[in-house]
Image: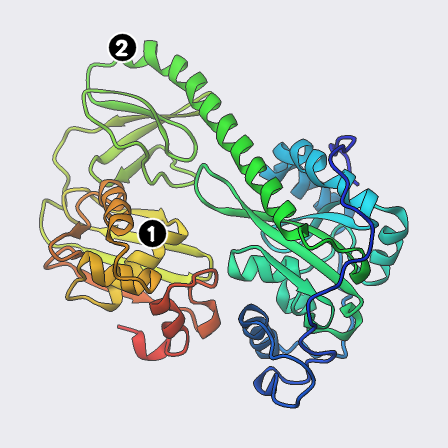
């Protein structure tokens, strides 16, 4: 394993052989005909969907898994800047020892499916080299077909892939279990944690173990973030006490550490590089000054030039997992915000149904269950506070009188690829017809 990986400890997974679940196929010649030739059980839905995606991407069962690896300098750069580095000790304690004992390897990959670190049994590490399961290699679906790392990235959910469920034939002797890891500061997917090894080494609880360890790692990131906000709050208090007008101190992700002269939301949609000034929803133009660990935002009290007239809303979903809302005009000025996966789903539903949706209708669109109105109302409450002035309610809809544009990706499979919302799933098959 690369630098910064601790000496792992943890409960070993037993190395005895367990009976494996039925393997759907020994060879996936065509996802379109999967399960139709009597060669075993039909593929699980998550596997069938993955086979279809990789077929569209041009992956073929007979290809290899080799990829152009990142050179050492680029790999080290990704390691240094990855939030995954902060939780390597937790991942190592939870999984590296288990992988070593069970004859498996632990893989930590970034959000693009590039292997950043690996650790485990020496013999299995050598076997992993033969399939390019090595540091710097690409394991997204479009590079190596259906596999736990790539499929977890594509779906945003934990997944185990058994033997013949792998699309590429050379992986049929392997089983892998992976879970995505999100940054609790902004909800962004930052990578995947994986256990891989020969099929005979896998314990039935392997996937549950990986999920538990990733949840612990996310909890550690959340705790560190709360501690950093407390440090920033201590810096902000004396500074804000000397400022006459409305002002806020926020961390790089927009979480508010302190304010004076106004009642702020818990978090603001702050651009990644705000510059000297920024327009923010509910605040309008703000002067920006850097602070250790965050930013000081001074609200400019002059009336904005745009007034309070109609504006324009653009929901841009062309970036796959990166969804951006841009608002131009109105009392809040012009601003852009990157959306969390759930908020992107909600705004997509409202962009498709311009007439608006009730809480029950949104629950059906998002979860396939009209009874989940409490969850919907809580999400909409947070979203309306964050995107001040953009949404109306009764029913929930984009602001009346404003122009709204929905920008969709060119490929149906790229429409919010991690979403399992029923409306989004239907929309993937009709991207072009949904364009405004």
Of the 4 image quadrants, the one containing the N terminus is top right
Query: Farthest residue toward the bottom?
Result: 37
Which residue is at the front of the view, 177 or 42? 42
Q: Secondary structure at mark 2?
A: helix
* Residue 415 image offset from top left, x and y in percent: 42, 67
Residue 333 lies in quadrant: top left
Of the 4 image quadrants, the one containing the C terminus is bottom left
Q: Residues within 10 Å of mark 1 (few under 14, many from 20)?
A: some
Q: Is residue 186 visible?
A: yes
* Residue 337 image offset from top left, x and y in percent: 34, 47
Residue 55 lies in quadrant: bottom right
Which residue is at the front of the view, 384 or 304? 384
Above-or-below relation of 194 to 276? below
Q: Residues within 10 Å of mark 2 (few under 14, many from 20)?
A: few
- Indicate the colouring scheme: rainbow
State the residue at coordinates (66%, 51%). 205
State the residue at coordinates (17%, 59%). 358
Q: Which circle, 1 or 2, is nearer the viewer?
A: 1
Q: Which label number is shown at residue 343?
A: 1
The answer to whether the residues at label 1 and label 2 have Cβ atoms under 8 Å apart is: no
* Horizontal arrangement in the rendering, residue 145 relative to residue 216 (left or right): right
* Horizontal arrangement in the rendering, residue 45 relative to residue 379 (left or right): right
> Of label 1 and label 2, which has the lower sequence position?
2
Measure the alpha-carbon separation of dots 1 and 2.
Answer: 35 Å
Which residue is at the front of the view, 374 or 180? 374
Q: Is residue 82 visible?
A: no
- Residue under pointer 2: 241
* Residue 198 image offset from top left, x and y in percent: 81, 60
State the residue at coordinates (20%, 38%). 282
Q: Secondary structure at mark 1?
A: helix
* Residue 257 image offset from top left, x and y in percent: 35, 23
State the residue at coordinates (36%, 78%). 432
């Amino acid at each position: 394993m690369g630098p910064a990986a601790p000496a792992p400890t943890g409960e070993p997974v037993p190395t005895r052989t367990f009976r494996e679940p039925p393997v759907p196929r020994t060879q996936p010649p065509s996802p379109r005909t999967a399960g139709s030739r009597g060669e075993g059980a039909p593929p699980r839905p998550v596997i069938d969907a993955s086979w279809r995606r990789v077929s569209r991407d041009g992956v073929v069962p007979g290809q290899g898994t080799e990829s152009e690896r990142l050179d050492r300098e680029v790999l080290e750069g990704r390691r240094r800047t990855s939030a995954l580095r902060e939780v390597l000790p937790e991942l190592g304690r939870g999984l590296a020892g288990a992988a070593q004992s069970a004859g498996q390897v632990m893989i930590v990959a970034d959000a693009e499916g590039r292997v950043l670190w690996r650790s485990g049994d020496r013999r299995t590490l050598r076997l992993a080299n033969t399939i390019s399961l090595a540091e710097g290699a690409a394991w997204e679906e479009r590079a190596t077909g259906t596999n736990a790392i790539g499929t977890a990235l594509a779906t945003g959910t934990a997944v185990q892939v058994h033997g013949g469920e792998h699309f590429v034939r050379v992986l049929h002797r392997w089983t892998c279990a992976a879970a995505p890891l999100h940054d609790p500061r902004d909800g962004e997917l930052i990578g995947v944690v994986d256990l891989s090894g020969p099929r005979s080494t896998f314990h039935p609880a392997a996937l549950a173990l990986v999920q538990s360890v990733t949840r612990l790692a996310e909890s550690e990131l959340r705790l560190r973030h709360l501690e950093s906000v407390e440090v920033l709050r201590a810096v902000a208090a004396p500074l804000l006490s000397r400022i006459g007008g409305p002002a806020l101190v926020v961390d790089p992700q927009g979480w508010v550490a302190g304010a004076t002269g106004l009642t702020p939301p818990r978090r603001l949609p702050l651009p990644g590089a705000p510059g000297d000034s920024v327009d923010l929803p509910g605040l309008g133009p703000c002067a920006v000054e850097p602070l250790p660990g965050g930013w000081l935002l001074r609200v400019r009290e002059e009336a904005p030039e745009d007034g309070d007239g109609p504006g324009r809303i653009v929901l841009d979903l062309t970036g796959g997992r990166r969804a951006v809302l841009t608002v131009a005009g109105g009392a809040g000025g012009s601003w852009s915000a990157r959306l969390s996966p759930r908020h992107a789903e909600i705004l997509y539903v409202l962009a498709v149904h311009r007439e608006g949706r009730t809480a029950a209708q949104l629950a059906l669109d998002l979860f396939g269950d009209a009874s989940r109105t409490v969850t919907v109302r809580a999400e909409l409450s947070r979203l309306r506070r964050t995107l001040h002035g953009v949404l109306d309610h009764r029913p929930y809809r984009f602001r009346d009188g404003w122009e709204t544009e929905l920008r969709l990706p060119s490929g149906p499979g790229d429409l919010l690829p991690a979403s399992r919302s029923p409306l989004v799933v239907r929309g993937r098959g009709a991207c072009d017809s949904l364009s405004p």
